[in-house]
Image (cartoon, rainbow, N blue to C red):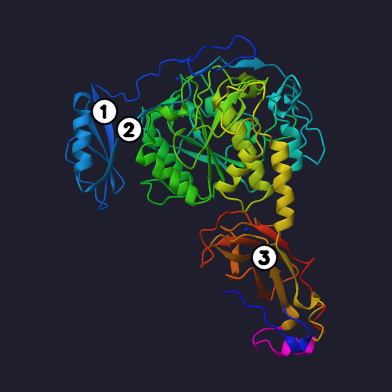
Amino acid sequence: MGNRIITCIAACGSLALAIPALASDAPTKSLAAEKSTPTSAVTGVNGQIPVVIKYRDGSVRAQSTTGQSVGSQVEIRSVHEEDLEVELQKLRMDKSVEYAEPNYITKKPKPVKSPVPVQTQPKARIQGLAPGEQPNDPSLSDQYTWLAPTEFYKGQHAALKAVQASQENDGLNIGVIDSEFRVTDELQYAGGYNFSRLGSEVGPEYLEAVYEPECSTSHGTAVANIIAAPTNNGLGMAGFVDANVWAVRSMSCGTGFLFDTAESIRWLAGDPTVPDVPPIGADIDIINASLGAQTSECPAYLQDAINYAYAKGITVVVAAGNDTLDASMFAPANCDKVITVGSVDRYGKQSGFTNFGDHIDVAALGELVLSMIKPGETAYHYGTSFSSPNVAGMAALIKQTNPLLGPDEIADYLKSTAQLNPEDPDAQLGAGIVQPVTMVNLVAERYEEMKPTISHVFDDPSRCNKEAYAALLPDSVNACQLYEVDASKLPANGFRYTVFEADAGAELSASTATAIEISEEPVFLVSDLQGTGKQYGIGLCDANGNNCTSNSLIPLGNQDIITDRYCD
């Protein structure tokens, strides 16, 4: 526990899936009556349907020769299509079975229009972006998401101003669950894994060319670059954040199984029960999943995985889908604890292809969204696959501006600052179009108000009688090296205020730094801090300094605060 503040009266004081293609960038409208027909949700081989079975006692009890154990609790069993409903009912009546769900076919959202290549020329390579500086990425002028909205183009987001207003955080980690990841000269992946069991085996290689060289599309590549292509490096395009991107292949060239998506989420969230896979070795902040399966209910195995990530403080952003249908018919769009994103065009009107309805949280530009497709080549993309990473990038801006915010707070900022388009009154896109500039400014303003402070105990003028105050301290406490942390404006929400120490110049994160003081009280004392060679930060964690709400910490400083001027 943290040292409690001592009250010293004698010493003068006391002491928080087929879609109609768009021929042009023309205003379009999606009405509930204009529906397309989704394809089959469950597909097997030779009439066999895979079923995910989780047992309560932790041991797989395979009862068929077609069963495959996935860890100690889960079995994937093939069931003949004609017997599916009967077998599911039997399994669900078995008291040893926690749940039994079909392993739904998952696809990237149906293509709306083929990517349209954009020709650009490289510029001088200068990494980093100063406040107010115009990035030198050659495709920036073609990135409509980054341009300010106008009276005509209400679907643009002024992302450039939002990026300039946010606080840069190189330690941010982004997980992209998709397929068709390719190497480009723009974005270098920090790592990744392959979880797709469709046509491949689980393993460390996540690039599409390794498994399906004939696959010619670059879906995951485009999604990842929208979020985190390096900005101001004289190449390609600009991304929302300069972050570490983890590419997780859950599909094979755009098609896979939904259980593999669930396993991908668990691995990104650091779940040690994912079988036969090494730990990720990073604390993920944001996950984007631009994919979906046709099912009117979120399967238990997928919701469990999302719940696990949520409990770890990870924000999960997903695409609504491109079927002109209610998003309640697709997972993960209909799951709890996700941010489901619909699409608008440049005019700010509901895209003709986007899914809609009560499960949509917000909308973002999903037409003419520029991103990479191969080394040195950018293209315009269409679909909620690309409105989703726009919002994931904006969520990352929130996270790096206030690293202690969790998924609920991030979702609240996105939705509370979004705006409905009065010129599109029939749109069914949740809170409306995201407004990243308003959002980031609000986060930054509130963050400055709530930031903890640290000062020497004798900096408080109420402690005018230093000798009397020091006399009340335990013999083991040196008053000249005693500091007061005030985190009273930071809501703990059941967590403990935790001070971490790291070497100067090292990453200041909960996973790499050392917890040196833990307190239930928001105002507490810390002793023996060093003025040189060390840096300090504060986080919200459990009673042991673990399971923090965020891996990122709020810096407390070092030599600017830590001093020996009271040690004479």
Q: Position of residue 171 (x, y in %)?
A: 63, 49
| Alpha carbon separation for disc pair 1 and 3 | 55 Å
Q: Judge the density around disc 1: few (<14), some (14-19), many (≥20) Cα neighbours within 10 Å.
A: many
| Alpha carbon separation for disc pair 3 and 2 | 48 Å
Do the numbered discs 1 and 3 sit on residues whose CB atoms are within 8 Å?
no
Which amino acid type is marked by label 1? Answer: Ile
| Alpha carbon separation for disc pair 1 and 2 | 8 Å
**Residue tagged by mark 3?**
488
**Bounds of the magenta span?**
466-478
Which amino acid type is marked by label 3? Answer: Ser
Task: Tell me if residue 471 is in the magenta stretch.
Answer: yes
**Residue 556 vs residue 36: left or right?**
right
**Residue tagged by mark 1?**
49
**Residue tagged by mark 2?**
103
Quadrant location of residue 481? bottom right
Quadrant location of residue 380? top right
Q: Secondary structure at mark 3?
A: loop
**Extreme top residue here?**
23
N-terminal of the two: label 3 or label 2? 2
Residue 314 visible in the current orientation: yes
Which amino acid type is marked by label 2? Answer: Asn
**Residue 45 vs residue 552: left or right?**
left
N-terminal of the two: label 1 or label 2? 1
Q: Nearer the viewer, residue 540 or 204?
A: 540
